[in-house]
């Protein structure tokens, strides 16, 4: 089968880090990723089935890996060689189209009894991601045993599969996994109290989906968003933001909305909650400057190694929280639902298939990765690999 494969190669990761620092996405040309012919992965145990990917999205975490910018924290939590791709819609052996829920928790790893987090359905907090019957891997797409969506064949556990509704396009289905991340973030933001002013930093795929999820599942009184590019600002408004500004204007907008004063770069009041969908040193620092005393900053975008001024956490009793993946959500009415079920509803309600703005065959992976890395400037949102013609091309 054809697959984009990443091998463990320190020199090539180092080259990717240099190239990616000069131009995002350039790691695809010098780094450890290559298009390879390899044997399809074998189902590692009972309950596993082979899948044929149809579309597979390119995520920010994939880009960070390809450009050698991922945190070394992940080194013991992945296994090589791995095939990326965790935003996947695929054909299952029984003829269904399915979306893959990629987190590899205790059930997929054959661990009995499951850890407390998996037992209550919080897969993102699994305590056994490097143990059990599988090689280490946080998710499908970072585990040598499972393969990933950037290929013509992979395997998944039956517990990971969600049937795609009849009449849905593949483009809609491939947006379910990233939408689940956004739904989880939106419901975490509203978990403790009704939201007055909420700020979202960043309007790439994660930021735009977070705006859509907040608007649909936990709308604040005022939702203000910072978006760098004109097309991103248009999408942010269309998906539910009340106020949309350029990043440099966000402090002034939050100050005006909340009636705060400014002391240096710090607002005296601020937003009830700030969701940072970028994860950079600058974006996290801005989030801490914009949140009110006693407020919360949620890291939705994946941060790496950063240097921060954290005095505000002590002085203003601000909370800085990570938001990873999905599982079981606790809704305001006291019920619980699976995040993926809520994500399917969001994709349909907000017509999020519109955000799939470019697709590429595997053979053009360098172009695809560079497009995804420069999506905002080029007017794109979600870039994906299209595997639907690969079977014919490989005959």
Image: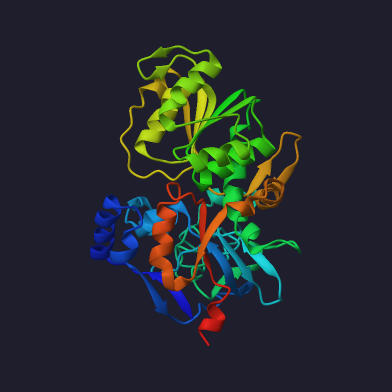
**What residue is shown at x 33% (from left), y 52% (from top)?**
69
Q: Is residue 309 left or right of residue 389?
A: left
State whether residue 109 appears in this view.
no
* Total numbered labels: 0
Against 105, residue 313 (above or below) is: above
Please identify the quarter of the rendering in which residue 67 is found.
bottom left
Please identify the quarter of the rendering in which residue 229 is found.
top left
**What residue is shown at x 30% (from left), y 35% (from top)?**
307
Please identify the quarter of the rendering in which residue 28 is found.
bottom left
**What residue is shown at x 36% (from left), y 52% (from top)?**
70
Against 38, residue 359 (above or below) is: above
Q: Is residue 14 left or right of residue 34?
A: left
State whether residue 363 appears in this view.
yes
Against 181, residue 163 (above or below) is: below
Location of residue 238 in the rendering, given as x and y in whole percent from the top left corner = 62, 39
Which of 115 and 315 lies nearest the eye of the viewer? Answer: 315
Location of residue 183 in the rendering, given as x and y in whole percent from the top left corner = 62, 43
Colouring of the image: rainbow
Location of residue 20 in the rendering, given as x and y in whole percent from the top left corner = 30, 54
Against 133, residue 194 (above or below) is: above
């Amino acid at each position: 089968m054809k697959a984009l494969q990443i091998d463990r190669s320190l020199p090539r990761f180092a080259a990717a880090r240099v190239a990616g620092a000069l131009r995002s996405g350039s790691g695809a040309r010098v780094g450890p990723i290559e298009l390879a012919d390899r044997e399809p992965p074998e189902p590692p145990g009972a309950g596993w089935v082979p899948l044929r990917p149809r579309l597979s999205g390119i995520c920010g975490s994939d880009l960070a890996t390809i450009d050698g910018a991922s945190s070394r924290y992940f080194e013991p939590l992945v296994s090589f060689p791995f095939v990326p791709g965790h935003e996947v819609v695929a054909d299952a052996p029984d003829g269904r189209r399915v979306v893959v829920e990629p987190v590899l928790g205790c059930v997929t790893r054959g661990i009995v009894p499951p850890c407390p987090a998996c037992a209550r359905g919080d897969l993102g907090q699994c305590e056994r991601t490097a143990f059990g019957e599988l090689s280490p891997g946080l998710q499908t797409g970072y585990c040598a045993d499972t393969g990933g969506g950037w290929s013509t064949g992979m395997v998944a556990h039956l517990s990971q599969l969600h049937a795609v509704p009849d009449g849905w396009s593949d483009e809609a289905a491939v947006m379910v996994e990233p939408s689940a991340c956004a739904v989880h973030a939106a419901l975490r933001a509203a978990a403790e109290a009704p939201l007055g002013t909420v700020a979202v930093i960043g309007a790439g795929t994660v930021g735009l989906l977070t705006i859509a999820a907040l608007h649909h599942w936990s709308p604040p009184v005022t939702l203000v968003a910072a978006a760098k590019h004109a097309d991103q600002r248009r999408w942010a408004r269309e998906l539910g933001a009340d106020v949309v500004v350029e990043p440099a204007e966000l402090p002034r907008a939050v100050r005006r909305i909340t009636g705060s004063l400014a002391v240096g770069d710090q607002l005296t009041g601020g937003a009830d909650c700030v969701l940072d969908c970028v994860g950079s040193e600058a974006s996290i620092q801005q989030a801490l400057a914009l949140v009110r005393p006693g407020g919360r900053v949620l890291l939705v975008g994946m941060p790496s190694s950063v240097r921060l001024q954290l005095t505000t956490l002590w002085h203003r009793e601000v909370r800085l929280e990570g938001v990873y993946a999905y599982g079981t959500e606790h809704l305001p009415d006291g019920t619980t639902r699976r995040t993926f079920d809520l994500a399917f509803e969001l994709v349909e309600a907000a017509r999020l298939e519109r955000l799939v703005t470019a697709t590429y065959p595997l053979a053009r992976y360098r172009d695809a990765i560079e497009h995804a890395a420069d999506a905002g400037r080029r007017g794109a949102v979600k870039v994906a690999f299209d595997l639907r013609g690969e079977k014919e091309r490989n005959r």
